[in-house]
Image (cartoon, helix red, strand yellow):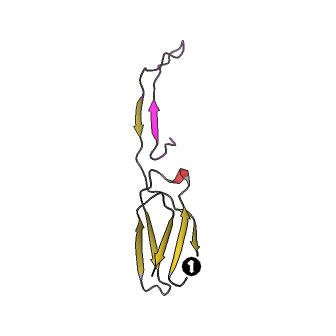
Amino acid sequence: TGLQEAVRYNFRIAAINQIGEGPLTSTNCSVITNESIPGKPQNLMIISPVSTSLMVSWEHPLPQDRNGIITDYLIYVQIRDGSENISMRNTNSNETTFTAEG
C-alpha cells in the first residue's frame, strides 16, 4: 500500500460504529520497514585527470531511492581495452569522491 523501505511507521487505532469514531489507542505501535538495495549514485564525473592520478566524483542516490542507510560505495575501474577489471571500495559513505593513483 505504498510503504517505503527503511522508514518508521507509527500506528494508532480507533474503533468506529454507526454513531462515530471512538478514541485512539493510548500507545503507538511502530515498525521500521526493511532496507532494500539502493538506487544508483548520481552525476558521476571525472575531475582533474593527469597522467598519474584522477579523481572520481558522484552524488548520493536520490533520497527516495536510498532505501536505507548507505554504508559504502564500490568503485569499478575497467582498463580501456577491457583486459582488466579492478574494484575499489570507498568505505566512508559520507565521501563522494575517490582518487585513483598509479
Left or right of 84? Residue 48 is right
Left or right of 87? Residue 40 is right
| Front residue of 1 and 81 | 81
Residue projecting furthest to the top? 19
How many residues crowd around disc 1 within 10 Å: few (fewer than 14), some, or many (20 or more)?
few
Instruction: Please name the residue that numbered disc 1 is placed on.
Output: 49
At horizontal 43% and vertical 60% (from top left) the residue drawn is: 92
Image quadrant in which you'd find residue 20: top right
Within the magenta stretch, is there residue 3?
Answer: yes
| Front residue of 84 and 58 | 58
Name above or below for residue 92 compared with residue 98.
above
Name above or below for residue 17 compared with residue 97.
above
Q: Provide residue 89's location: percent of width, then percent of height.
A: 40, 67
Q: Provide residue 57's location: percent of width, then percent of height.
A: 55, 67
Q: Provide residue 48's location: percent of width, then percent of height.
A: 58, 76
At horizontal 49% and vertical 45% (from top left) the residue drawn is: 4
| Front residue of 3 and 6 | 6
At horizontal 42% and vertical 27% (from top left) the residue drawn is: 28
How many marks the image carries: the answer is: 1
Within the magenta stretch, is there residue 8?
Answer: yes
- The kind of residue tagged 1 is Pro
Report helix, strand or loop for mark 1.
Answer: loop
Image quadrant in which you'd find residue 37: bottom left
Most prominent secondary structure in the magenta stretch? loop
Magenta region: 1-28
Quadrant location of the C terminus?
A: bottom left
Name above or below for residue 52 compared with residue 4.
below
